[in-house]
Image (cartoon, rainbow, N blue to C red):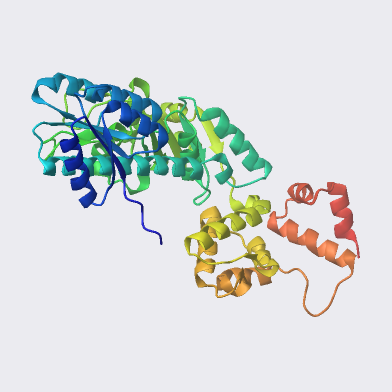
Amino acid sequence: MAEQASPNLLVVDDDPVTLNLLKEVLAKEGYRVEAALGGEEAIARGGDRFFDIVITDVRMGDKDGMEVLRSFKKISPETTVIMITAFGSIETAIEAIREGAFDYISKPFKLEEIKITIRRALEQRKLLQENRFFRQELLTRYQFKNVIGRTPQMLQVYKTIAKVADTKSTVLLYGERGTGKELVARSIHYNSHRNSRPFIPVDCASLVENLMESELFGHVRGAFTGALFTKKGLLEEADGGTLFLDEVSNLSLPMQTKLLRFLQEHEIKPVGGMESVKVDVRVIAATNQPLEPHVKNGRFREDLYDRLNVVSITLPPLRERQEDIPLLASHFLQRFSEENKKNISHISPEALEVLLRYSWPGNVRELEHTIERAVVLTTHPIILPEDLPTKMVEEAKKADTLPPEKLLPLKEMEKRYVLKVLQETGGNKKKAAEILGITRATLYQILEKE
């Protein structure tokens, strides 16, 4: 692995003695240092090459430090500028900070102070670069294309995400466990104008009842036994961003009332607090079961349901979008192969057949974990059936409709398949005919054949 290049520094002063001292000292620190005798030379050098940090005196004969700062802000916005100022020009130094200088050092300066300031500047640059990278990675990860699927149901999901992403509306996501509700919630958030602010997921099923209010709304010091300090709630932490309430049906009725009040008034009151706090938070909720029955039996407030259900998105289970299994499996294979530094080209047709015949009670999450396990355990350049869990291979064998002892006539195979579909639909002939793409009259004819 190649070593990272040392930072490029430019020191600027119209005093040759000070200039040479700084250049020598900073070079010994391992930096690549260039010197410019005055502001005009510094600006010219900035037009030729990139400098990570510029250390410039404020008062110089030709172009002063403020002109150097302003020029670098135009020609090289990524460059960090540190000012060196005499006591009499502190006001100029403060003005420099307002215009974007990182810091200023007063004369007579200590060399150790300059070294520390440069280290702080480099650390800040690193954090900013990491933050930009992280934000870009999030935006890339949660692009629509990463919500995988081409079935009509998934295309409808994409359309709704695109329409709702940049609005203020609350969204209610329906779907079994493992269908990707949080991924869709993150896609909505990271494709909205809120994407630079927090996305905070909350698993309502795991919140302890007596601490639930404190977790969401915060508390002040002394609000209850053990409240040793004031704590922000998750709603305040998410200010400007999105709060994702997973398994929202698990909220108690008192908490539902408080959440409803927040959605109506956009303000919260911490436990034990006297003052309300205004917060701007978009709420996306999710449930793995329909909320209507909970509303009818009084376990979920109807007015809160109406507030959350402004836009609803239903995520289909994987068994209802089998055409997407090869696409999803290929996506996960590529990802986990890269993460584990393994060169696995594809999934064998036999292994793919096993995946297609499995019922996937754990949905997309189960498929993801299955492919990850196969990538980690396989010793082959392709995924084979033996790399998949035994239960999947056995279920695929049971699903085989051809008896091993003999090949059957087409009419007999046709009848057996119709009977299998009828069995799967609980004897519902209308539904079976719809699945088979035939009329009920044709279904009866097939069943009556000798």
Q: Nearer the viewer, residue 146 or 206?
A: 146
Percent position of residue 424, x then y: 69, 57
- Lateral position of residue 293 relative to residue 350, left or right: left
- Lateral position of residue 108 relative to residue 323, left or right: left
Quadrant position of residue 145: top right
Furthest residue toward front: 16
Percent position of residue 247, x then y: 42, 43
Above or below for 292 versus 360? above
Q: Nearer the viewer, residue 169 or 16?
A: 16
Above or below for 9 versus 82? below
Q: Nearer the viewer, residue 194 or 64?
A: 64
- Say which residue appears at 73% left-offset and 51% top-offset: 428
Residue 201 visible somewhere in the drawing: no
Which image quarter is the C terminus in?
bottom right
- Say which residue appears at 31% left-offset and 33% top-offset: 235
Residue 17 visible somewhere in the drawing: yes
